[in-house]
Amino acid sequence: MAHAAGPKLDVYASPTATTPERALANPIETGGPLVLLVEADDGGPRVQVQLPARPNGSRGWVDRGAVQLLTNPYRIEVSVGARRLRLLEANKEILATPVAVGAPATPTPLGHFYLTELLIQPNPGGAYGPFAYGLSAHSNVLTDFNGGSGQVGMHGTNVPSSIGRAVSHGCIRLPNDVITKVRAYLPLGTPIDVVA
């Protein structure tokens, strides 16, 4: 994981580019820290990171000195077809749960993503349960949702009967007691692989 160290983080198109192609704000819009998933690190002056941007899987390079690099033993696997989530620590499963995934018209995007933010919900009994993680993934069919960019989330729910079904707008819904347990483990930057 790469934690931005300053108020903005320059992102370059290659490890040798001299001009940044974009800058990311730290903290992010919702007030949390800017954390990116490291995709490649050859020990050079820059590391390759996944960006929380469209298209899904976008990558760029950031200066090593502009971030704090941390290791993370956790990762998440979600099977859309099985409607199941597994949480692993050092490749050992420590939690498994049924989940709700995207409906056929608004499917959960497949790919390699990461957790970008954690939002503590003001109403734990509301639509997103007590906690909602934002993912680096964006919907492939919705360009906006509820005033946002169509970013996919992983959150609780106030409709427990939806768990195990394909009913969401693309988000991954967990039972509220499970998202509460998961929150105790997962730092931002945790990778999440969503497979068919």
Image (cartoon, helix red, strand yellow):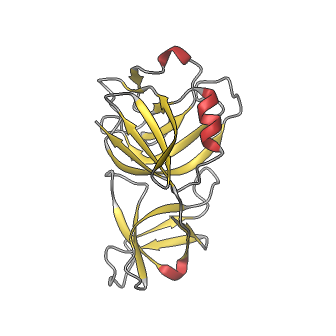
Residue 102 picture quarter: top left
Residue 139 location (% of width, % of height) = 36, 39
Determine whether, in the image, residue 145 is placed left or right of residue 194. Answer: right
Q: How many labels does the image show?
A: 0
In the displayed image of the protein, which residue is found farthest to the front?
92
Residue 50 location (% of width, % of height) = 39, 61
What residue is shown at x 64% (from left), y 24% (from top)?
126
In the displayed image of the protein, which residue is found farthest to the top?
161
From this view, report whether residue 29 is shown above or below residue 102.
Answer: below
Residue 48 location (% of width, % of height) = 38, 71
Residue 44 picture quarter: bottom left
In the displayed image of the protein, which residue is found farthest to the right?
122
From this view, report whether residue 95 is shown above or below residue 41.
Answer: above
Q: Quadrant of the C terminus?
A: top left
From this view, report whether residue 40 is shown above or below residue 88.
Answer: below
What residue is shown at x 53% (from left), y 29% (from top)?
174
Determine whether, in the image, residue 65 is placed left or right of residue 103. Answer: right
What residue is shown at x 57% (from left), y 26% (from top)?
175
What residue is shown at x 36% (from left), y 85% (from top)?
18
Observer-nearest of 76 and 127: 76
From this view, report whether residue 21 is shown above or below residue 44.
Answer: above
Residue 191 location (% of width, % of height) = 45, 53
